[in-house]
Amino acid sequence: MSDSLVIIRTFCNLVDADDAQVELLTAGIHSLLFSDDSMSLHPNSPPGDAVALAVHNRDVTLAEAALTIKPRLA
């Protein structure tokens, strides 16, 4: 199913998860963040304080490429 959600990354804090979500949005990829308080909304949500980043199944490859570490200029 192309509409199923796939968790592609798990973060220890909301700031890092939000930064990744912004990267995806900049690349034109819609995503969702799940945390411990949203477990009832998605059965594969991460436990504890972790924050998971999920995309549609059809966008997994593009999302992984968009989140690949890019070298920064000094």
Image (cartoon, rainbow, N blue to C red):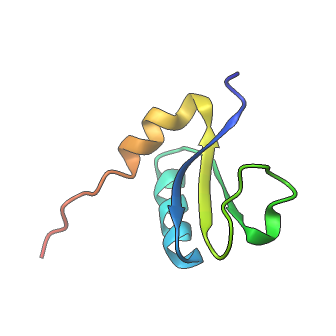
- Judged from this view, the residue extending furthest toward the left is 74
| Quarter of the C terminus within the rendering | bottom left
Count of number-bearing discs: 0
Residue 52, percent from left and from top? 61, 60
Image check: 59 left or right of 44?
Answer: left
25 w.r.t. 13: above or below: above
Image check: 29 left or right of 49?
Answer: left
Question: Looking at the image, which is closer to me, 33 or 36?
Answer: 36
Question: Looking at the image, which is closer to me, 47 or 32?
Answer: 47
71 w.r.t. 1: above or below: below
Identify the residue shown where x is 46% and y is 58%. 23
Identify the residue shown where x is 49% and y is 68%. 19
Identify the residue shown where x is 54% and y is 67%. 17
| Quarter of the N terminus within the rendering | top right
Residue 39, percent from left and from top? 80, 60
20 w.r.t. 4: above or below: below
